[in-house]
Image: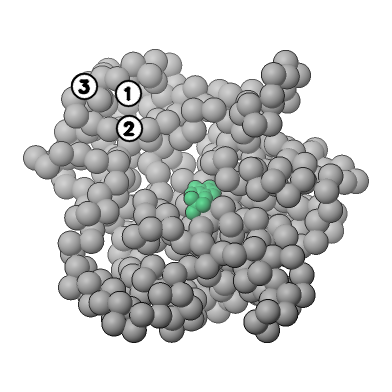
Amino acid sequence: MRSIQMVDTKTQYLHIKTEVDAAIQEVLDSAAYINGKWVKEFAAELGTYMGGVHTIPCANGTDALQIAMMALGLEPGDEVITPSFTYIATTEVVALLRLRPVFVEVDPRTFCMDPEALRKAITPRTKAIVPVHLYGHAAPMDAILQIAREHGLYVIEDNAQAIGCDYTSSDGNVYKTGTLGTIGTTSFYPSKNLGAFGDGGAIFTRDAELAHQLNMIANHGQQKRYYHERVGCNSRLDSIQAAILRIKLRHLDAYNKSRQQVADYYNRAFAGNPHIQTPVVAPYSSHVFHQYTLIINDANRDDLAKYLSENQIPSMIYYPVPGHRQPMFAGNSDNLPDMPITDWLTERVISLPVHTEMEEEQLEWITRHVNNFLS
Ligand SMILES: *Cc1c(COP(=O)(O)O)cnc(C)c1O
């Protein structure tokens, strides 16, 4: 059996090596390392894939969130509601822009923002909501968008973990996550479902004027070179990454499908185990399984991780410290917001290896050991 890894970008690369190497060589031959034609081509193709939305490439998923918040003209002190149970990038940029992150609970079944908690967190200072499509499952966008409409709030979808996920709206139409809110963002960090061979990110919107502003902000606030209309930043996707991503985009649906097959295998193997709660897929969402995350109900999750590790099975805790407890936000305060669901999940989640190159033998080994420990 090949050694088991959380992600296996190397083997994935070997399957498309000829195409990728040729694309990289083409960029090298052109020497157009920045702003080469591949960047525009990739942005256009990704925009089409996402259902025909404006697509602004940028340097990474964290910048994408920052640029999105900059484009909305938020003022220092404005409140931005985000889940505590997410990767730090979502909330870090809120604080970086001198906005106030307001943490809310997630639904423990889907790990995504709880609309009732969102409703309760709204104040006169609230300006934006940042739902996260965590682990590759969509947040309940109908409810979130409804609340946003009622209160006149912006919605920025953090779609870094869910590129390719389908959301079935209450209007019966199917949309890609990241295209439902005011702005959507994503990341092409190598281990993401659409991963570059370095850093990258993108921003989505249906609003042409916002797209124009987002483009300017990502490019030093300029439209015309050396004429800077507003304060921006320098956030570019480089040509080599764009050329690679163009190729990988053509495989994205197949990649997501193979992740779903891994999840199906796990689900079947754990179905009868009373100690394990397998991922729930809500009727409105597909699931692209950026992570396959279990909740361990009544056993010691850390002991399980240790046992798996002793048997050459990697696992990860996403994330060991929730946002509201990070020193970055909490300092030494004893006066933390009360987030029992987030704290409960933080102590019980464990993510198993899921990627496009997993073999049945590996899955059999992993599930046998998990079930063995939790029997
Ligand atoms: C990966 C990730 C980001 C940040 O993306 P980078 O490209 O690493 O900056 C933001 N939000 C979530 C939920 C992520 O998983």
**Which amino acid type is marked by label 3?**
Glu
How many other residues sit within 10 Å of disc 1, few (<14), some (14-19) or many (≥20)?
A: many
Q: Could you tell me residue 110's position as x and y percent?
A: 53, 41
Q: Quadrant of residue 293?
A: top left
Label 3 and label 2: CA atoms lie apart by 11 Å
Q: Is residue 374 left or right of residue 152?
A: left
**Which amino acid type is marked by label 1?**
Ala
Can residue 167 be seen at all in this image of the molecule? no
Q: Could you tell me residue 229's position as x and y percent?
A: 77, 75
- The structure residue drawn at horizontal position 22% and vertical position 54%, both measured from the top left corner, is 10
Q: Are marks 1 and 2 in contact (CB under 8 Å)?
A: yes
How many other residues sit within 10 Å of disc 3, few (<14), some (14-19) or many (≥20)?
A: few
**Which amino acid type is marked by label 2?**
Ser
SS at circle 3: helix
**In the depicted view, which residue is nearer to us: 184 or 56?**
56
Q: Quadrant of residue 17?
A: bottom left
Looking at the image, is mark 1 or mark 2 earlier in the sequence?
1
Rendered-image quadrant of the C terminus: top left
Looking at the image, is mark 3 or mark 2 earlier in the sequence?
3
Residue on which the image places disc 3: 310
Q: Is the residue marked 2 within 8 Å of ligand 1, measured from its CB?
A: no
- The structure residue drawn at horizontal position 23% and vertical position 61%, both measured from the top left corner, is 13
Q: Report the colour scheme.
A: one colour
Mark number displayed over residue 315: 2
Q: Could you tell me residue 65's position as x and y percent?
A: 62, 56
Rendered-image quadrant of the N terminus: top left
Among all residues in the image, which is located at the extreme front? 226
- The structure residue drawn at horizontal position 26% and vertical position 19%, both measured from the top left corner, is 307
Residue on which the image places disc 1: 305
Q: Is the residue marked 1 within 8 Å of ligand 1, measured from its CB?
A: no
Q: Quadrant of residue 188?
A: bottom left
